[in-house]
Image (cartoon, helix red, strand yellow):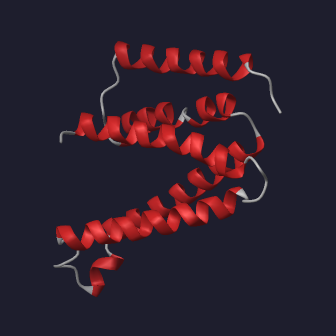
Amino acid sequence: MNYVAWAILGMVGYSLVTLLVKLATRSGQFSSFLVLSIATVIVCTSTLCITVLRGDARTLVARDFASPSALWAYATGIALTLAVASLFRALSLGPASVVVPIYGMFIVGGAILGMVFLDEPPNLRKLLGIALAIVSIFLIATGAPRR
């Protein structure tokens, strides 16, 4: 699969996450953090199995875990924890129709960070897309009732 197919699969998966978190927390029996804990165990187990089956860690040695790539991976884990824990908590407190569009602004944030820190060239089309995304999120998030 190419990167577009993977991105579409990820989008479908994250779309389902939204619905499933709301369903899991709706009764109040499971907290957002319990749901996240269960989901994280499944993610961790699955990705460790994939990593082993692909042989991705076969050539690593202990010092590799102190390399710049490892440090970026640790920072990624911290950022992902913050992002997903916040999303799950927000979904347990408010309507998905407001939470998801606001959370989805990470797309704009990622695009801007890519242009600023990864030297990805901005152009009128990208900047217009970012501006329209911001307007659309504003319209969606402010048009729904809040709980």
Q: Determine the residue positioned at 38% across, 42% down.
A: 10
Q: In the rendered picture of this protein, how many numbered marks are placed on residues? A: 0
Which residue is nearer to you in this view: 58 or 8? 8
* In the displayed structure image, the side of residue 83 where residue 113 appears, left or right: left
Residue 50 vs 129, above or below: the answer is below
Q: Quadrant of residue 48?
A: bottom left
Query: What quarter of the picture does the N terminus occupy?
Result: top left
Q: Residue furthest bottom?
A: 62
Position of residue 124 measured from the top left corner of the image (x, y, whole percent): 36, 13
Residue 126 vs 110, above or below: the answer is above
Query: What quarter of the picture does the C terminus occupy?
Result: top right
Which residue is nearer to you in this view: 95 or 77? 95
Position of residue 39 measured from the top left corner of the image (x, y, whole percent): 53, 61
Position of residue 40 measured from the top left corner of the image (x, y, whole percent): 52, 64
Position of residue 34 measured from the top left corner of the image (x, y, whole percent): 67, 64
Q: Determine the residue positioned at 16% across, 79% down.
A: 59
Does the rendering let one see residue 112?
A: yes
Q: Determine the residue positioned at 77% across, 44% down.
A: 93
* In the displayed structure image, the side of residue 123 where residue 98 appears, left or right: right
Q: Quadrant of residue 73?
A: bottom left
Which residue is nearer to you in this view: 140 or 74? 140
Does the rendering let one see residue 56?
A: no
* In the displayed structure image, the side of residue 68 where residue 30 appears, left or right: right
